[in-house]
Amino acid sequence: MNIRDLEYLVALSEHQHFRKAAEACFVSQPTLSGQIRKLEDELGVVLLERTSRKVLFTDAGMSLVKQAQKILMEVKVLTEMASQQGEDMSGPLHIGFIPTVGPYLLPHIVPALKQAFPELELFLHEAQTHQLVQQLEEGKLDCLILASVRETEHFKEIPLYHEPMILAVPESHRWADEAEIPMPKLQGETLLMLADGHCLRDQAMGFCFAAGAHEDLRFRATSLETLRNMVAAETGITLLPKLSVPDTLRRDGVVYIKAVDPEPQRLITLDYRPGSPLRARYEKLASIISETMSAHCNAV
């Protein structure tokens, strides 16, 4: 038994398909299948039911998968401990981003990070919060950059910046010529929102509900760009994070207005696993990101 065999086992449990698991491990399907059989022989237990086209794990198999995940996590920690406690800003670094942050933040910070740490190899992964949390817990990602929410409270969080939310209305809207809109004026209004799974949805709804507004239940967007296009089509109004808003406050049929009293905003943080020996590395990353974003948002 070796670490690679455990990686095959965990990959098979995640993909539930021999070919896909083999591709994820960069080996041939016969190699992965053969190593799983060897693992069964060595352990003396049946890990899989092979009477179906689907990959079905036995109870013993699932127990071993969970233990293998723990072992692989400890191996990752051991590797991190050997990397000069995070002082060496070189090598691969896997960072997760949520869809409402990544596309708008990366153009600002990637050049700055490459300039500051030219030996650091960045791997960027985009997914919704619950998926990123799971991947960080399993050791597939090194750190996350996302909006601080309840699901991330058990991680170590480094505050990066506060990002205001901007009110987006159609050009024909009665507020289109206003410079600011107090949040209490949203009372009774209906706002377009993102679909379930986006943490921005919950944050925006919290501010809207507090102001007496409610959600348009006829439509839920899967992205900020869909929300923007729906506003341009005069189907409603919404709140958008500042980084997603263009420099000009009137563009492509949408007018962007500052919301005040109070100003709705979200806290963007860099999250990593408690006890990670790479704390110094993450603090250096956070410092560059906060410095870079100070001109665009309220950096912490």
Image (spheres, rainbow, N blue to C red):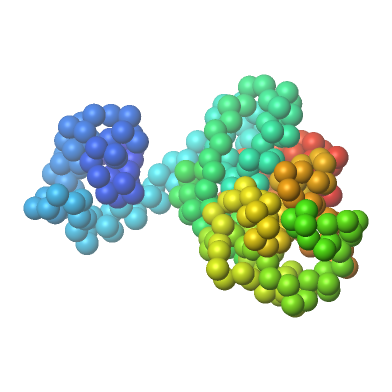
Residue 288 in percent (x, y) is at 76, 36
Residue 221 in percent (x, y) is at 56, 57
Residue 217 in percent (x, y) is at 57, 71
Image point 83% across, 57% down: which residue? Answer: 176
Image point 19% across, 58% down: which residue? Answer: 58
User: Tag count in the figure?
Assistant: 0
Q: Is residue 226 left or right of residue 189?
A: left
Up/down of 177 relative to 278, above or below: below
Residue 230 visible to an observer of this rendering: yes
Up/down of 60 relative to 275, above or below: below
Image point 74% across, 50% down: which residue? Answer: 254
Tell me the quarter of the image containing the N terminus.
top left
- 224 and 33: which one is in front? 224
Q: In this view, does 4 lie to the left or right of 270?
A: left
- 57 and 256: which one is in front? 256
Up/down of 164 relative to 11, above or below: below
Q: Which residue lies furthest to the right in this view?
A: 179
Residue 275 visible to an observer of this rendering: no
Q: Residue furthest left?
A: 51
Q: Which residue lies furthest to the front in this view?
A: 172
Q: In this view, does 298 lie to the left or right of 106?
A: right
Image point 21% across, 55% down: which residue? Answer: 57
Residue 108 in percent (x, y) is at 73, 34
